[in-house]
Structure formats: C-alpha cells, structure tokens
Amino acid sequence: MSLAIVYSRAGMGIEAPLVTVEVHLSHGLPSLNIVGLPEAAVKESKDRVRSAIINSNFEFPARRITINLAPADLPKDGGRFDLPIALGILAASEQIPAEKLSQFEFIGELALTGELRPVKGTLPVALSCTEAQRTLVVPKENASEAGLVPSNQALHAEHLLDVCASLAQNQSLSVCEPGTHLNGHNFDVDMSDVIAQESAKRAMTIAAAGKHHLMFIGPPGTGKSMLASRMPTILSSMSEAEAKESASIYSVSHLGFDSRQFFSRKYRSPHHSCSAPALIGGGCEFYR
C-alpha cells in the first residue's frame, strides 16, 4: 500500500476544522514535499518526522513522499500535524497497519526522539472529534484538557511507539480524564469580604438574579474593582455549552485554564486605558 489517509484537526480560533492528511509514496528520487497551504512550522515538520521515525527504530522510506493537507485552502500552522504525518508515512510504507486509522484523529508535535509534545487548542479538537464520532489521540500533557469532554473517548500517549503499538493491538492507550473534579464553586474571594456597601451589594444581587447589565461609576478607591471581582460568586453556573465555549477560548490562548472553575463565569480586569485591539484581539490572526 503506497497511500495512507490520517485524520487531524487544524486550529482556527475556537473552531477545529477537519484536516485529512494524505500520504503517497511513489518512485523517484527520495524527497518529501508537503502541500495544502502549510505555514513555516508545518513545513519544518519533515525534519522532525524523519528523525522521530528513525529514532523510533522504524525505517524512513527512501522514496518520493508527497503529503497533502486537505482542504487545500485552509491555512495550517503549528506542530500539531507531526504525529498524523508520521503515522501516514509508516502506514503507507506498510510498517504499521492502516485498517484502524479511519477510527481515530491524531494531534501532537514530535520531538526528534519520537516523544509527543503538547499543542494548544486541544479542547476545541476534542469537541469536534466527539461530533465526528472518532477517538482522539493526544500527547500526555494535553490529557486533562481533552478529558474535559466526558462524552469523548480521548486517549493519550507519551511516544510515537505507544501509538504504533496501539494500532498494532499490542498495547492499549490510557483514557484522558480531567485533572480535577469539575465544579463551579471554587473561588478565592467571596461577597462576605465586602464591609458595608449595602446599596452596591443590593444592586449586584438584583442584577445577578435578573441577568441584567451593571455599570460601576465612582472615583478611584471606592471599591468598584473589589465588588466587580466578587460578582461571579453570586452568578449562576454556566451551562455545559457555555462552559465548553469559555474553556475553548482559554485552550487556544494558553491562559492557564483551571478545570476546577469549568462551570464558573470568568472575571477579566483589563486596564481602563487599553485599546480596542488590546481588549478583544487584533492582527492577522484575529482577522483571518
């Protein structure tokens, strides 16, 4: 078999569109070409993949290798395609079985030794993989994030050899689980910390109960930020859909998401002098 197809996911904001990694081996001078609108980090994966395959005691095929990342008009960036590209090369060269590849989706960056390194945006990938009814395989460092989707059977591995052994049915991979119990009541502050300010606390209670907007106006030092930071403690917990959307934003931005506050409403305190792009984002990545 000289053609292999592996499924992965790209990162586009909080979306994770499907990417089909097609690997074809043909006769000719040994080379490796990646097509499908890859950015610099994806083009450099050829060197990481080659070293990872060789250091994992596999044979890197001395043939003309063409890798297509479909759809061709979707930009691909980052090192998340290292693992599916390596598996596609191994499957196309018949070094691992290719029968079960269609049941999985793979993301993960490869070290030169074959170890799997974490990637950002794992949660949106897990959500999209669940809708596609496939099993997701991620690096071990992304296991707690992928485990936030209880309906998804996500697996994690530490090395390329672990994934290959799993496909060959020699060993099973571990199931991803959230790092801690998910809840929405883990706060470092509380409304009981506020002394006096009875009228302000009453306004906050009414706004929280009725889901109204609330504006704080006053000179510096009157307690506006202190009160605002305690507003999430009296708000209702987010629904599962809202929590997943909020966690996806943290996942793609590397803001250090805390799974203990999965269902709690988030509080952000940007400086009053920040510009609109600083507040909501900007640049080519924002407008893409």
Image: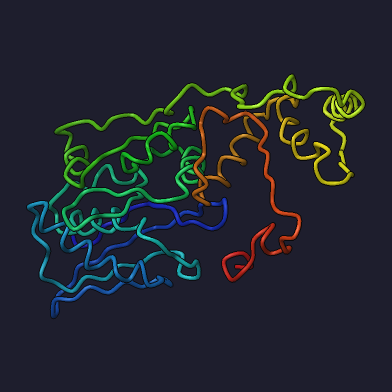
> Taking 243 as reference, is 26 above or below it?
below
Q: In this view of the protein, which residue sits in the foreground, 168 or 211? A: 211
Question: Does residue 17 appear anywhere in the picture?
Answer: yes
Q: How many numbered marks have been drawn onto this rendered protein structure?
A: 0
Identify whether 39 is placed above or below 270.
below
**Dividing the image into 4 quarters, which one contains the C terminus?**
bottom right
Q: Position of residue 33 (x, y in %)?
A: 27, 74
**Is residue 103 in view from this perspective?**
no
Q: Residue furthest right?
A: 199
Q: Say which quarter of the image contains residue 153.
A: top left
Residue at position x 28%, y 53% from top?
Answer: 83
Quarter of image, res 137: top left
Q: Position of residue 194 (x, y in %)?
A: 77, 24
Q: Nearer the viewer, residue 233 or 52?
A: 233
For image coordinates 24% across by 53% down, the residue present is 87
Judge left or right: residue 49 versus residue 17.
left
Q: Name the quadrant of the N terminus.
A: bottom left
- Given the current orientation, which residue lies at the most extreme front position? 221
Closest to the observer, 151 or 280: 280
Against 283, residue 82 (above or below) is above
Residue 40, quarter of the rendered image: bottom left
Q: Is residue 287 left or right of residue 96?
A: right
Residue 83 left/right relative to 8? left
Residue 21 versus residue 47: which sits nearer the camera? 47
Instruction: Point out residue 111 in the picture as x, y percentages from the top left corner.
Output: 23, 55
Q: Residue furthest bottom?
A: 29
